[in-house]
Image: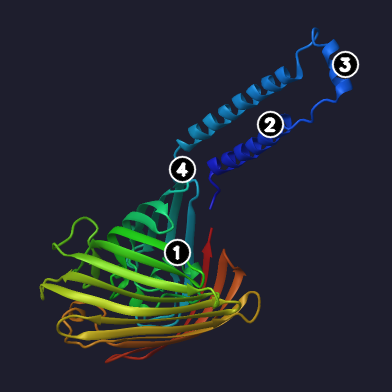
Amino acid sequence: MVTIQSSKIRYLIKKQAFFISLVLLALFQATPLRADEQDRTQISTQSQPSISDRQQEEINQLRQRIQILEEKESSEDLHPQFGMNLGAYGDVNFFTKDREANHPSFSLGSLDLYSTSHFGPRLTFLAELQLEINGQTSGGNFDLERFWVGYTFNDLLTVRVGRQHTALGYWNNTYHHGKQLFLTVDRPFFLAFEDDGGVLPVHTVGIELMGSQSLPTLRWMYELDIGNGHRIDSTTKLLVPNDIADNNSAKQVALRLSIQPNRLPGLTLGVFGTSDRVGTDANGNIDERVFGSDFSYMHNNVEFITEYFKMLNLDHDATAYYIQLGYKVARDITPYTRYETLDVNPADPYFSELQNNTSRHQTIAGVRYDIDELRSALKFQYRRDRKVGSETFHVLEAQWSFSF
């Protein structure tokens, strides 16, 4: 990500203004002349300006300089900034035969492009586009994953409007789309994005309110989303966020509350829930609710995350959870393991409409090698994929992820 040019200019301006302030302070606090110096000065008052006059002239010049610098800063702020801090995430993969491929294969992952802009300390903007490779052709298609504008009033209130990740647990609002951010090769399968067969409403188009407050013993945070509900496409059997218009009058509401105790650095505890009226062709509108909790601990060499989801409607319910543990044994080597599971009732009217509508369990074990902790990593893992009523797969996977 390239540094915004106006930020450099503001830094130089502040540096010069600080120097000017020191000069002004020195002029105003000049040591008074002794009596003998005053006598000598009085003799030459007719031939040269007084010291106070020279001081006033220098002060006026310095004030003019400050005004010029401030005007220059204001003009720079008006220049377009989108793309000046463009960043990208990508990944390339290899895997043996699995549920989606009949042969060992290399695979191009997605290319995730994003840009953020800040206008002052309060106004922010983010756009994130993902190029997804089409398996049927040599091309791909762009998806607008996140797109929002936000304004921060104070620590307790930031308002964002647009398309953003729903406040459902820890993973969905922490790791986003770049796989370089993941300890593992991929997300828990039931937290997959909607167009990848995910079963949860992980994107919301609407308004988000968020804030936090630090107390003597802990820091607490909240995230509140209000937006369009989802629908299930009867052709693709995928959950679809309503980006353009809602298909009913009800709105999805999601809320997550979390705390970080001061005495346990790296620990975050959260509870969350959402209510969504999902439109379907076969079963009409389904009032689907999701409740859950999350626990994460990131401190020293330990990375531990677990989340639990309860999905229910008037007819049936389903449960999903995962437990992930990683421990850094060296500066750049982290072994990890994860267990993830989804248990559903085939008669559930919500899941019966979806592509992934059966119970599934996965066990993962692997290791991550950081070429550069922020920029690039190699990951090697084994995945046991067991799906009710289907073949069990034992998959070996490798991934090279990167960001720039």
Q: Quadrant of the C terminus?
A: bottom right
From mark 1 to mark 2, how far is it between C-alphas?
A: 39 Å
* x and y percentages locating residue 195 in the rendered image: 29, 68
Q: Residue at x 54, y 78 (%)?
A: 264
**Mark 1 = which residue?**
213
Q: Secondary structure at mark 1?
A: strand
Up the image or down, 339 lies above or below 63; here it is below
Q: Nearer the viewer, residue 123 or 196?
A: 123
> The residue under label 2 is which amino acid type?
Leu
> The residue under label 1 is which amino acid type?
Gln
Q: Secondary structure at mark 2?
A: helix
N-terminal of the two: label 2 or label 3? 2
Q: Secondary structure at mark 3?
A: helix
What crowding class fits label 2: few (fewer than 14 Cα within 10 Å), some (14-19), or many (20 or more)?
Answer: some
Q: Which mark is residue 143?
A: none
Q: Which mark is residue 81?
A: 4
Q: Is residue 153 left or right of residue 275?
A: right
Q: Are marks 4 and 3 in contact (CB under 8 Å)?
A: no
N-terminal of the two: label 1 or label 2? 2
**Mark 3 = which residue?**
40
What crowding class fits label 3: few (fewer than 14 Cα within 10 Å), some (14-19), or many (20 or more)?
Answer: few
> The residue under label 4 is which amino acid type?
Gln
**Mark 2 = which residue?**
24
Mark nearest the camera among 4 and 3 is 3
From mark 3 to mark 1, how far is it between C-alphas?
A: 63 Å
N-terminal of the two: label 4 or label 2? 2
Q: Nearer the viewer, residue 359 or 102?
A: 359
